[in-house]
Image: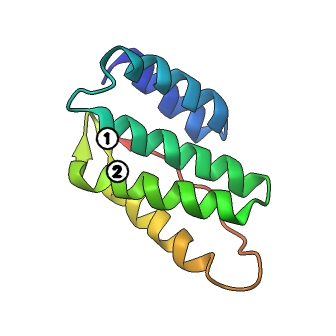
Amino acid sequence: MTALLAEGVELFNKGHYWEAHEVWEREWTPDRKGPDSGFYKGIIQIAAGCLHYSRNNRRGAINKWRSGADYLRPYLPRHKGVRLAPLVRTVDGYLAAMNDASWPDLTMPKIETT
């Protein structure tokens, strides 16, 4: 795991979703079309979904979580030292919970590493 990826994971796990997004962008930008592109898009979008959820933006959370999980699926169960299967499973549960008319009380995920 690279230093920037680890820094982003630490920020994400502390609930600093925007800051994690920014760190991961710095890691991903030099090789935006490389083989890890979908991985970085996925974790960045899941972080954005968490930020939208914290701001009570249902549509934004759903859109970012859905696309983020879809970007990560090809990298399951883990990639670059990040356990993706539990993260994607959790996000899939959030998407199901967001289908209810009421606002679900969700605990934001933590990213597990290996």
Residue occupying the point 61% across, 56% down: 108
Residue picked out by circle 2: 71
The label number, if any, that marks residue 9 in the structure image = none
> Which residue is the extreme one toward the bottom?
101
- Residue 86 at what x, y percent from top left? 37, 59
Position of 108 compared to 53: left or right?
A: left
Which amino acid type corresponds to the residue marked 2 in the rendered image?
A: Tyr
Relative depth, front residue between 64 and 50: 64
The quarter holding residue 57 reads bottom right
Residue occupying the point 22% across, 52% down: 74
Residue occupying the point 28% across, 35% down: 81
- Residue 42 at what x, y percent from top left? 41, 45
Residue picked out by circle 1: 38
Q: Quadrant of the C terminus?
A: top left
Dots 2, 1 in contact, CB < 8 A: yes
Which amino acid type corresponds to the residue marked 1 in the rendered image?
A: Gly
Q: In which quarter of the image is the N terminus?
A: top left
